[in-house]
Image (cartoon, rainbow, N blue to C red):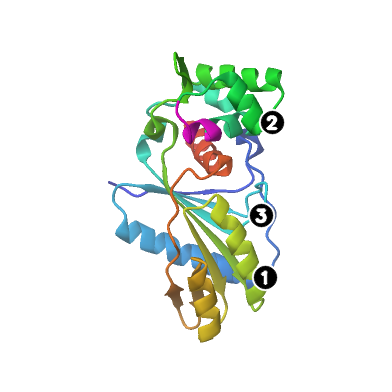
Amino acid sequence: MKQVVIRLNNRPEIGLLSRSSTNGDEQVLVEQFIDYYCTAFRRNNKKTQLAVFVEPRIDSGYPDVVFASYLPSILDNWTAEREKLDVSDLKVLSYLSGVKGVKGGTIITSLGFPEKQTLNSLEKLMDAKLVTYRTSGWQICELREAFSVKKLIAVEAKLSDVSGVFSQSYINTRFASHSYALINSAKPSSETIQKFDGYGIGLYSKGNCFKKHVEATEYSLPSSYVSFQFNEWIGRAISH
């Protein structure tokens, strides 16, 4: 299968907003890492495609880069109604992905949304063929039909601020399957390596070449509605 690598930056028509990168050494480091990662991906992956997001706007800020590995079957169950889903709808979908058969009142109480808004989201999700209602209550359709992303790898880069990049990388664990930090240092200290390893945050460094010092802990997906956002951005981008 031919590998497809798409880069998604600031696409308001699909709901994706990105911050403009600041010229400088840090941007160069990020661009070099993107080239490095994409080359390795093409070499090592045969069943998935790759979407690269550079500084996408999510609720916690702008991660430097997010690599989303997804199944090419993402469009097999795609519907035009998915283009209409917004953040509130995806929050309801994310909640339903973690439970099995709940009544509307439980959803309202759990999410704290107004009743009208919640019912509207459920209607939109049903029109998009992402949820169904049965005697046991509302539930998501087969997850593999709603969510095609296999990995979400977030990477935060800093030239020297190890403490800052650690904090940002830790925040990214709430939506990513793998969270990495990238620093411009050939030999991180043993204390730095131990700190990242202790929190399950991966660590890359850049000397003459890129080197992985810590393998990131893998978290299951989808882990939040932000995980669903990346899935929907990809589907909308390639369906247009």
Percent x, y of residue 95: 55, 34
* Amino acid, disc 3: Tyr
The residues bearing labels 1 and 2 have C-alpha atoms spaced at a distance of: 33 Å
Residue carrying label 3: 62
**Residue shown at 44% from the left, 31% from the top:** 146
Percent x, y of residue 74: 40, 35
* Amino acid, disc 2: Gly
Residue 141 position by quadrant:
top left
State the residue in front, 152 or 196. Answer: 196
**One can see residue 130 in this view:** no
Residue carrying label 2: 112
Comes first in the chain, label 1 or label 2: 2
Label 1 SS:
helix
Report the disc number at residue 164: 1
The residues bearing labels 3 and 2 have C-alpha atoms spaced at a distance of: 26 Å
Circle 1 packing at 10 Å, graded few (<14), some (14-19), many (20+), is: few
**One can see residue 181 in this view:** yes
State the residue in front, 172 or 194. Answer: 194
* Amino acid, disc 1: Gly
Circle 2 packing at 10 Å, graded few (<14), some (14-19), many (20+), is: few
State the residue in front, 82 or 121. Answer: 121
**Residue shown at 35% from the left, 35% from the top:** 73
Mark nearest the camera among 1 and 2 is 2
Percent x, y of residue 160: 65, 79
Q: Is residue 148 left or right of residue 23?
A: left
Label 2 SS:
loop
Label 3 SS:
loop
Circle 3 packing at 10 Å, graded few (<14), some (14-19), many (20+), is: some
Q: Is residue 50 left or right of residue 65?
A: left
Assess whether mark 2 and mark 3 are in contact (beta carbons under 8 angstroms): no
**Residue shown at 54% from the left, 56% from the top:** 173
What's drawn in magenta, residue-wise?
94-100
